[in-house]
Amino acid sequence: MKEALTFKLKNLEYASVALFFIVTFVLSIACEQDFLYALHDYSLYLDSDPFRTIILSYGAGCLSLVSRFITQFFISPVFGAFAVSATLTSIFAILLRAFAKQTNAKKIVFAAIPPLALLVAVCNLEYLLFDKVDGSIVMSLLLGSLIAVLLSWWMQVENKISLYLSMVVAEFSYFAIGVFSPLSMLIGAAANIKKDNKKAMMLAGIGLASWFGFNYLTANLLNYEVYSLALFAPLYVSHSSTFFAYSLIAMALLVVYPFVANKCGEETELSAKKLAIPAIAFGLVIVVAKLCCYNDESFHKILRLQRLENDEKWSEMVTEARNTTHPTFDIYAYYLEALIANGEKVDQMFNFPVDWESYNTGNFCMPHMIHYEDFAFATGNYCMSLFHAMEYYQLTGENFRRLKRMMRCAVMMEEPELTERYLKILETSSVYSDYAKEWRKYANDKQQLLKDREAYKNFDSYFEPKDDWFHAYSAADFIAERANISNPKIAEARILAELYAKDLEAFARDIPVAAQIYKGHVPPKCIQEAACLCAIMGNTKPVQSITVDRKLAMDAQKFVKECKKAGKNGKEKLSGHQGSYLYYYFYKNVDTKNYKGGDLKK
């Protein structure tokens, strides 16, 4: 019995590596699928000499190019999860073998901490993903860390010639892998503390000196980059981010690990009883890592909606958007886009749980940058969509998402030459060659596209081609601040947006336009209820201008009386009226911080 409960350390090591891979893969595939797809979507790799030459001209260009190449295959989130978990597991396995002669349970727990810290850094890219960061930076961090621990492992050999060779390779790899070159020297130095202090000091000194020295060459003579950009290439971003901070912490843990591993004692074999505490600690480390990942619901919802939009699954988009606890303007924008694609009336916005909450992020990331060109495209404003896609393509970095958007805009604008240019670029990517072939048949035949895809027909009919407008703030303001009411669809959208903002004063002012739109027709229920509400508040002009159902008017008066009578408990007592504009007006909150209209209390 005792022999059955005794484990060989070699078997324990293999089991822990296998378990680590399974855990990281399951976490990635279960919780980060849409994020991994977004990494692909917000990066770009083209199989062309001009593209490769430009990337290689940057600091750590070789690592960036390889990372972009791998990240393009994240178009399959399963592959993305495999790539991330396999890289992290490789780092874990090397840490187990490289810096200690004998593995024991404590060392397994300590070895798991640095790669799990890297996973936390990866999953804390958060809203920065939308602003000035290429999605391939995640693979740059993971691959760079893997290369660093491999080089530091090489430095552990006893042979002096091999040691000096490994140092030379690590030194001059700075131009290819950037900050991970001095990282490898520092890890190697930490592994030799106590064992060989002279060797440790030599590695640390040369690593730090070359880091600052080569950085000067990179910034001033080779790539002409900002000093801090060259110093932390390829991880540095133009403004502070949690991703950058977590990356530095993970790298620091990689440096500390060899020193901690050498402090652990040796064991020849372990019993099941002795393994209990390390096993619990191993599990706790994994749980803490998961809790430290960026778990903002709105962020993951936006990523999910963008992925569904790419796949043109409009009905699923509507369902996903409605199933939101804390909706933001961006989620609302994609919800409207899906409604338009399905040909549903936009006044269904009042069935949406619009208790707005602004997301908090340390990054300077304007909300409209996430959905701007997408929403403009959905409302038939292809010129504006193209303009903003091109603008953000330049300002925030090239990526597949905006490249595809520009190509679709060119098709809908019936610009075959422009379409051809974008298609040729997409064809130089191995993952989008089939996609380019699929769209090529529409390059000179927009009508065929409208026949094949109902959504594009709905997009095309939302606004008249002559209607061109230039500015937007949020999803609602995007429509509401349109100054010129030149066709019924725009006018209806504007009025509905005023109701969304609870700006009954503006609604009453625009009621003559509504009267023209619905002349001879019954207006939507939400507009009738808003007109009744104006009358109850003393302005009878809206009720007199449009057709209002008598029963609806009486129900509206009854609702307002019950609302006043119920007081603080009204929300619960009148919950049966959810979906009506009256309930929305009295019991739903709006984001007053971003609203630019009138007094919401009026």
Image: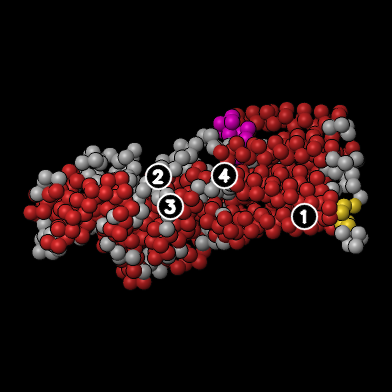
Q: Is residue 121 left or right of residue 267?
A: left
- Mark pair 3, 2: CA separation: 10 Å
Q: Earlier in the sequence, mark 2 or mark 4?
A: 4
Above or below residue 574? Residue 249 is above
Q: Nearer the viewer, residue 492 or 56?
A: 492
Q: Residues within 10 Å of mark 3 (few under 14, many from 20)?
A: some
Decide if residue 40 is in sight here: no
Quadrant containing the C terminus in the rendered view? top left
Query: What residue sits 38% from the left and 55% below the top?
Result: 334
Q: Nearer the viewer, residue 295 or 155?
A: 295
Q: Earlier in the sequence, mark 1 or mark 4?
A: 1
- Mark pair 1, 4: CA separation: 25 Å
Q: Earlier in the sequence, mark 3 or mark 4?
A: 4
What residue does disc 1 label?
16
Q: Is residue 458 left or right of residue 86?
A: left
**Callout 4, which amino acid?**
Asn
Query: What residue sits 42% from the left and 64% below the top?
Result: 316
The disc at residue 91 is none
**Rendered image quadrant of residue 171:** top right
The disc at residue 357 is 2
Q: Position of residue 237 (x, y in %)?
A: 55, 37
Q: Residues within 10 Å of mark 1 (few under 14, many from 20)?
A: many
**Callout 2, which amino acid?**
Glu
**Callout 3, which amino acid?**
Thr
What residue does disc 4 label?
124
User: SS for tag 3?
Assistant: loop
User: SS for tag 4?
Assistant: loop
- Mark pair 3, 1: CA separation: 38 Å
**Rendered image quadrant of residue 321:** bottom left
What residue does disc 3 label?
325
- Mark pair 1, 2: CA separation: 42 Å
